[in-house]
Image (tube, rainbow, N blue to C red):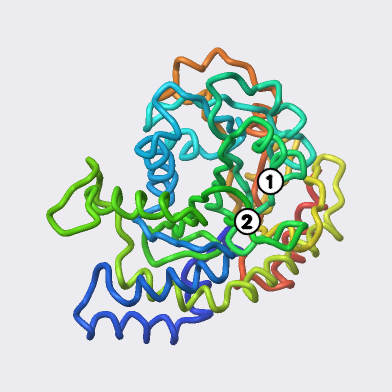
Amino acid sequence: MIPFLSLKDVTSLHGEEIQEAVARVVSGGWYLQGSENEKFEEDYSRFIGSKYTVGCANGLDALILIFRAYIEMGVMAPGDEVIVPANTFVATILAITENGLVPVMVEPRMDTLEIDDSLIEAAISSRTKAICIVHLYGRNAYTEKIGPLCRKYGLKLVEDNAQAHGCIALDGRRTGSLGDAAGHSFYPGKNLGALGDGGAVTTNDPSLAEAVRSLANYGSSKKYVFKYCGRNSRLDEIQAAVLDVKLSHLDDDNLRRKEIAAFYYDNISNPAISLPVRLAGENNVYHIFPILASRRDELQKYLKDNGIGTVIHYPIPPHKQECYKQWNGLSYPVTEYIADHELSLPISPSMTLEEAAEVVKRINAFE
């Protein structure tokens, strides 16, 4: 059996260090907002290339806090618009609507599966205040057109970096440091995953960082003094310690993912299956390896019957979800095509090339 992802195997790669880090926190007796958070935030800022990292409870909160902070700072107001890819996990959209902002969805390109930068300018209106790009599947979504568009129209650039920890853009910067602010998820299955939920905001803006930190701490930057009506969204000390251990191995773990991905690209050959365009090696950290299959459900069952686990990301796009029924009538044909045909193959730092070869063998034999 080749699982889609074995968190036990991934954790065991650095198990001894992780157990030592957890034991250190447990015996230390300080479990929230302590030295482990401080160290991880410093190390993550250095890694990403941002001045500030603010830990929080999860990736959705990270994005929510960014937009809420911009509202508190007077940069945005409820009713303002945020351009966002239609092809994304629902959390990206939730973070926008949670703040009373309006998502303006833009189709992806079929070859990259990321937002189509040629369609962005036409979606900009007098109410637009930000572009939110999503580095979906671990693929860098930033392009040379997006930065100039933000400058031309005075827009904030927000990154959803939940799936792309460690990804390096073509100019050498890491995703999460390309825009004005970025939200990161440390859900266990991510490239940099905790042993539970966790998230962070990165930015070079000290005012935004301060606002996010206060909002995540009930709205307080000083004990019992509340500037904002905030929420409780904090990264605990155990998760921070675990993340700091895994951060030190992240580039190597991502390299393994790239080796598996390269094997897939070089060896998958089946006319019923297409692969997204192969980005430059350092422009993708392969959190997910998506393929598009004309008979996706049949292929998934066939692979399952042959001991290979797969996952569909994501079978119902945000604009077709019941929670957004006001948009159910909208048509985003590229996004809908991806939702109907996408299948994710196993890929992780604990996966072997022998396992990848078995996946390829079964896919190429599918008729």
Q: Is residue 248 above or below residue 337?
A: below
**Left or right for 335, reference 185:** right
Q: Nearer the viewer, residue 72 or 316?
A: 72
**Left or right for 155, reference 169:** left
Q: Which residue is mark 1?
A: 141
**Mark 1 surroundings: few (<14), some (14-19) or many (≥20) residues within 10 A:** many
- Which residue lies at the image location 58% right of the left edge and 30% below the top edge? 83
Task: Return the mark for residue 132.
Answer: none
Residue found farthest to the left: 224
> Can you say which quadrant of the picture contains the N terminus?
bottom right
Report x, y in % for residue 344: 64, 49
- Which residue lies at the image location 41% right of the left edge and 51% below the top edge? 207
Q: Which residue is mark 2?
A: 175
Report x, y in % for residue 71: 39, 35
- Which residue lies at the image location 64% right of the left edge and 54% below the top edge? 138
Dividing the picture into quadrants, the one containing residue 241 is bottom left
Report x, y in % for residue 293: 74, 39
Tag 1 secondary structure: loop
Dividing the picture into quadrants, the one containing residue 271 is top right
How many marks can you see?
Answer: 2
Q: Are marks 1 and 2 in contact (CB under 8 Å)?
A: yes
**Left or right for 364, reference 24:** right
Residue type for callout 1: Ala
Label 1 vs label 2: CA separation?
9 Å
